[in-house]
Image (tube, rainbow, N blue to C red):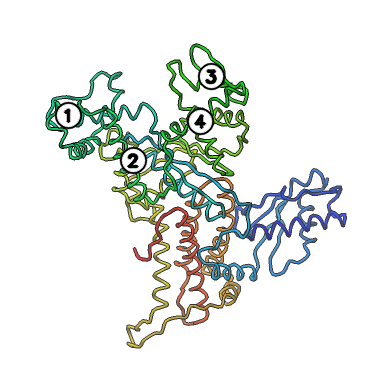
């Protein structure tokens, strides 16, 4: 990577300068203490390092430090180094740019993937919705971001296992079954409705989505259901199981449509039935980490960094949500995963400390658990925020996907940092304009494909009628770079070089994004990359009278298309060849 190349050159030069006594009173330097950044003015160079922090130990002015370091660089090759104040600026030489293009040409879809990392076996859990109804748009954000993160971590080199935790052991399943009974009775002609009293109504799911479930239930039990009076003859658990299985199937089908694929759907109910929840409680009890108060069983989570102790078994004997969560995360570790990453809604922030506390109390390393807390999604229409409940056809994730498409939904859901509230502009997401980021990016890929298609297919000249042969795919990258040098004043050449540098940034992007667990950075990068390509396209004739220059520029277009497609594949957003 250019960043690493530049940093290594500077750090080696610092050590040489210290040894030669050129850095004042500075006697040692710890590698990795200087950050590499992009100059605010791109004319200064491709990268920069501010060495002002060394002034405290060197006891000389930053410009003197910078000049001493540059003078100590052992081999400047064809790269350019300059000093402005305390900054050392770097401009990559031709050989580095040629090597980059050759690397993209040889690696293709694996370009950007690091050669060696400390590989981990990671379990990534996200969405994990109750099987009691359709996904809302918040679930869509976790689905888009979680699956993109899984793709990113796999591309980086980790082993990633994706899991959906089904919350099917609580009272909500009984609530679902009772709600289905009412819908079945309605379908069979009984004049019945959900309670009007707010408190009683909370014991049901009054949504219309259970109407088709009721129709299917009647078909499946037609021999038993001759009239509404037969409904109560069937055990409640039958209704519960039918509704749960139906909603799970609906959820899984939508996930497939949304390009989200889990390795396992883990049932909380099986966790209880296996005895693992009970075993965790007993282990905590035997180690003295539980106590009873007011009829409930409490976990001493405050001893492990939580702000207070937590109830794990209520006075009525029922487990709290925390009890199963403890057992579930222990089960993950016992399955041999090195790291657990969970994506939760921001409203679950209070659970982070208590789950980590439980792991530590049971003898596990709490740092193996990472929690990514995500903020909500606001729907915006014509510049105005819309309450989801006010717009009936936009309540669910499926409705949103049907209206704007999978690509737009996935891209928009992933393009902001997870800890930032997302404003999803419905109308903009549907437009074919440069203001719509997903269209802007996809159009850049389609435009590159069009250029390559026109150049690599035989064409007929409209004036002479002669056949123009296809341009060969082999390119002299040296010709492309020397073309930059020969025309330094041309805007076209400047845009071409900027595009090459932006392609190189993909390698550092993959590394930093995987390490920080961020995918919005990929969205930002593809927008910037598309912008550089559009500028290059508008200022540069790719197909020229000079065959060698044409082949070289065409190779740059191909390199762009390759890197953009690699980035979009991480987001699971399509890279169309025609638009």
Q: Position of residue 312 (x, y in %)?
A: 50, 22
Query: Badge 1: how crowded within 10 Å, few (<14), some, or many (20+)?
Result: many
Q: Which residue is mark 3?
A: 298
Residue at point 54% right, 29% down?
280
Secondary structure state at the residue bearing disc 1: helix
In this rendering, would 319 be left or right of 367? left
Q: Which residue is mark 1?
A: 185
| Disc 1 from disc 4: Cα separation | 41 Å
Secondary structure state at the residue bearing disc 2: helix
Residue at point 56% right, 74% down?
480
| Disc 1 from disc 2: Cα separation | 23 Å
Labels 3 and 1: the sequence-earlier one: 1
Labels 2 and 3: the sequence-earlier one: 2
In which quadrant of the rendered image does the N terminus lie?
bottom right
In this rendering, would 37 be left or right of 201? right
| Disc 3 from disc 1: Cα separation | 43 Å
In which quadrant of the rendered image does the C terminus lie?
bottom left
Labels 1 and 4: the sequence-earlier one: 1
Q: Which residue is mark 2?
A: 248
Query: Badge 2: how crowded within 10 Å, few (<14), some, or many (20+)?
Result: many
What label sits on residue 349 in the rendered view? 4
């Amino acid at each position: 990577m250019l960043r690493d190349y530049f940093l290594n050159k500077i750090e080696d030069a610092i050590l040489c300068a210290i040894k030669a006594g050129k850095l004042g009173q500075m006697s040692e330097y710890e590698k990795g203490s200087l950050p590499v950044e992009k100059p605010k003015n791109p004319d200064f160079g491709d990268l920069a390092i501010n060495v002002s922090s060394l002034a405290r130990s060197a006891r000389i002015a930053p410009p003197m430090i910078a000049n001493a370091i540059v003078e100590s660089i052992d081999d400047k090759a064809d790269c350019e180094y300059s000093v402005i104040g305390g900054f050392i600026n770097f401009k990559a030489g031709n050989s580095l740019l040629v090597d980059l293009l050759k690397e993209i040409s040889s690696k293709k879809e694996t370009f950007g993937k690091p050669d060696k990392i400390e590989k981990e076996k990671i379990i990534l859990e996200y969405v994990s919705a109750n099987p009691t109804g359709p996904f809302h748009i918040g679930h869509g954000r976790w689905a888009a971001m979680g699956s993109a993160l899984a793709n990113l971590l796999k591309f980086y080199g980790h082993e990633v296992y994706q899991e959906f935790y089904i919350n099917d052991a609580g009272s909500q399943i009984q609530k679902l079954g009772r709600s289905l009974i009412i819908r079945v009775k309605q379908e069979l002609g009984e004049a019945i409705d959900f309670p009007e009293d707010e408190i009683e109504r909370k014991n049901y799911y009054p949504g219309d989505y259970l109407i088709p479930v009721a129709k299917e239930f009647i078909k499946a039990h037609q021999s038993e259901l001759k009239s509404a009076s037969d409904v109560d003859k069937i055990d409640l658990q039958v209704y519960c199981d039918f509704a749960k299985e139906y909603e799970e199937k609906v959820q899984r089908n939508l996930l497939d449509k949304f390009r989200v694929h889990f390795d396992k759907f883990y049932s909380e109910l099986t966790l209880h039935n296996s005895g693992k929840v009970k075993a965790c409680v007993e282990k905590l009890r035997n180690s003295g980490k539980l106590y009873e108060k007011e009829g409930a069983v409490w976990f001493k989570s405050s001893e492990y960094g939580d702000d207070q102790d937590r109830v794990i078994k209520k006075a009525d004997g029922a487990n709290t949500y925390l009890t199963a969560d403890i057992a579930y995360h222990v089960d993950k570790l016992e399955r041999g995963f090195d790291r657990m990453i969970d994506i939760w809604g921001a409203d679950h922030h209070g659970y982070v400390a208590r789950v980590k506390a439980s792991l530590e109390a049971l003898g596990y390393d709490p740092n193996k658990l990472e929690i990514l807390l995500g903020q909500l999604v606001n729907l915006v229409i014509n510049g105005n925020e819309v309450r989801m409940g006010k717009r009936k056809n936009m309540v669910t994730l499926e409705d949103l996907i049907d209206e704007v498409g999978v690509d737009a939904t996935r891209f928009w859901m992933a393009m902001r940092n997870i800890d930032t509230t997302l404003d999803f502009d419905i109308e903009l997401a549907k437009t074919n304009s440069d203001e719509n980021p997903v269209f802007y990016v996809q159009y850049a890929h389609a435009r590159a494909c069009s250029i390559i298609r026109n150049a690599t297919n035989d064409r007929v000249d409209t004036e002479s009628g002669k056949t123009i042969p296809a341009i060969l795919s082999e390119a002299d990258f040296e010709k492309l770079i020397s073309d930059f040098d020969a025309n330094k004043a041309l805007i076209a050449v400047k845009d071409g070089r900027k595009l090459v540098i932006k392609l190189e940034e993909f390698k550092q992007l993959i590394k930093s994004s995987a390490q920080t667990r961020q995918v919005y950075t990929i969205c930002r990068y593809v927008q910037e990359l598309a912008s550089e390509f559009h500028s290059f396209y508008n200022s540069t004739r790719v197909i020229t009278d000079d065959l060698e220059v044409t082949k070289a520029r065409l190779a740059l277009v191909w390199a762009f298309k390759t890197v953009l497609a690699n980035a979009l594949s991480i987001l699971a957003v399509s890279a169309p060849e025609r638009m």
